[in-house]
């Protein structure tokens, strides 16, 4: 009964440190990312509410990236704390088995690994896709806020705006519009079907998904390469087809794991978002899936390496440096895994190496750990 309470205490302390460190890293990284997202309001004209929702939906992805490092720090900090407060010495004196404690640490690592798999495989693709859909479904209700006086604005794909000024009635004065991809649909028949349209107007304003213009000229270049000029006193241009330069289609990291597996297996699917026949896309797909499934395999390895801190050596110098040695060695492994991840899509060898490396190293280090702990107990 007492041993169970001790195991529970150790587990809770490690999880408390892990959550604290993880939330700290997440808060710092999210703040930096949120500053970068300000372009959604400043450059792309999205509302503050859309900006806030989009930023919040990116938190889980940020959290997932810091799980391995946070777990490593929590293990080192927790074990060092136990040792500094002589709690470990009390446990060994009470007859607790170090191998049993190491197994508890391994179980904790397994649970954290499972947590990361759930986030990376299921939660992150869903919420990231949700955030992208949030931008895609938002209408162009704030287009006027994007237009600055005496400045060319290209916030929309294929559309360039220029205005001299805005008056107190929110009217635009001396307007220039350049459309190079046919996004403008006009009520002037001569301008329809154009590939390239230039619009000049003395003034105008936005109303109900349209821009109303007065006293100007529409110059069009149609599919037959014919140039036509149309003068108008008043006309309306639809802005329904305007698309922001912000990427609204889901990126590969925002695509569900099932769809990526389906794509990789060359299964025909009308809902597939990735064109697998392209070599670069296939490589990126393999890299993305490897990150989601393979990176969590390194977390139990971290717990085994951290368990070497439980071994006591007679040399005081080693006992002082061991936490730095363990942290440095594990950090190098994490860096190596990130580097190796870049090459998993190039060949089957690099792919197998990425997944087998943590498993082989885990078995080897766990065997060495048990051997050292048994030897230490025999010497005593």
Image (cartoon, helix red, strand yellow):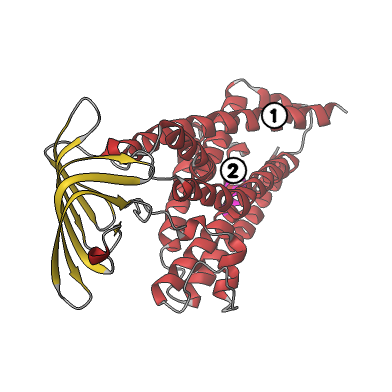
The dot on residue 32 is none
Q: Secondary structure at mark 1?
A: helix
In screen coordinates, is 35 left or right of 355?
A: left
In screen coordinates, is 124 left or right of 336?
A: right
Mark 1 is surrounded, within 10 Å at the Cα level, by few (under 14), some (14 to 19) or many (20 or more) other residues, namely few
Q: Is residue 342 above or below residue 53?
A: below
Q: Position of residue 46 (x, y in %)?
A: 38, 39
Q: Position of residue 310 (x, y in %)?
A: 62, 37
Which residue corresponds to the image point at 14% horizontal and 67% vertical from the top-left? 228
Which residue is under mark 1? 12
User: Observer-nearest residue: 289 or 249?
Assistant: 249
Report the magenta residues as a range: 298-304
303 inside magenta stretch? yes
Q: Mark 1 or mark 2, which has the lower sequence index?
A: 1
Q: Position of residue 363 (x, y in %)?
A: 64, 59
295 inside magenta stretch? no
In screen coordinates, is 210 left or right of 330?
A: left
Mark 2 is surrounded, within 10 Å at the Cα level, by few (under 14), some (14 to 19) or many (20 or more) other residues, namely many
Which residue is under mark 2? 308
Q: Position of residue 224 (x, y in %)?
A: 20, 78
User: Observer-nearest residue: 123 or 247?
Assistant: 247
Quadrant showing the C terminus: top right
- Magenta span: chief secondary structure: helix
């Amino acid at each position: 009964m007492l041993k169970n309470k001790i195991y529970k205490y150790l587990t809770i302390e490690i999880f408390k440190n892990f959550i604290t460190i993880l939330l700290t890293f997440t808060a710092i990284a999210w703040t930096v990312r949120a500053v970068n997202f300000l372009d959604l309001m400043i450059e792309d004209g999205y509302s503050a509410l859309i900006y806030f929702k989009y930023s919040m939906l990116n938190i889980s992805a940020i959290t997932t990236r810091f799980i391995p490092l946070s777990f490593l720090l929590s293990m080192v900090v927790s074990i060092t704390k136990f040792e500094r407060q002589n709690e470990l010495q009390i446990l060994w004196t009470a007859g607790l088995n170090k191998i049993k404690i190491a197994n508890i640490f391994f179980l904790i690592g397994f649970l954290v690994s499972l947590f990361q798999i759930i986030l990376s495989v299921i939660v992150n693709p869903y919420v990231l896709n949700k955030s992208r859909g949030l931008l895609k479904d938002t209408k162009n209700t704030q287009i006027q806020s994007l237009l600055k006086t005496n400045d060319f604005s290209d916030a929309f794909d294929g559309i360039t705006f220029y205005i001299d000024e805005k008056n107190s009635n929110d009217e635009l004065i001396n307007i220039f519009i350049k459309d190079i991809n046919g996004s403008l649909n006009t009520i002037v028949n001569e301008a329809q079907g154009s590939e390239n349209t230039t619009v000049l107007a003395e003034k105008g304003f936005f109303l109900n998904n349209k821009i109303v213009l007065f006293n100007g000229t529409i110059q069009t270049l149609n599919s037959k390469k014919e140039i036509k000029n149309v003068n108008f006193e008043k006309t309306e241009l639809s802005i329904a087809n305007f698309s922001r330069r912000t990427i609204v289609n889901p990126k590969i990291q925002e695509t569900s794991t099932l769809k990526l597996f389906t794509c990789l297996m060359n299964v025909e699917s009308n809902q597939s978002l990735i064109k697998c026949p392209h070599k670069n896309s296939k490589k990126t797909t393999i890299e993305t899936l490897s990150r989601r499934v393979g990176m969590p395999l390194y977390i139990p390895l971290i717990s085994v390496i951290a368990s070497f801190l439980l071994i006591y050596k007679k040399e005081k110098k080693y006992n002082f440096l061991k936490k730095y040695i363990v942290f440095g060695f594990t950090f190098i492994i994490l860096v190596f895994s990130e580097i190796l991840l870049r090459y998993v899509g190039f060949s089957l060898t690099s792919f197998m190496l990425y997944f087998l490396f943590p498993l082989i190293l885990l078995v080897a280090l766990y065997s060495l750990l048990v051997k050292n702990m048994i030897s230490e107990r025999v010497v005593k």
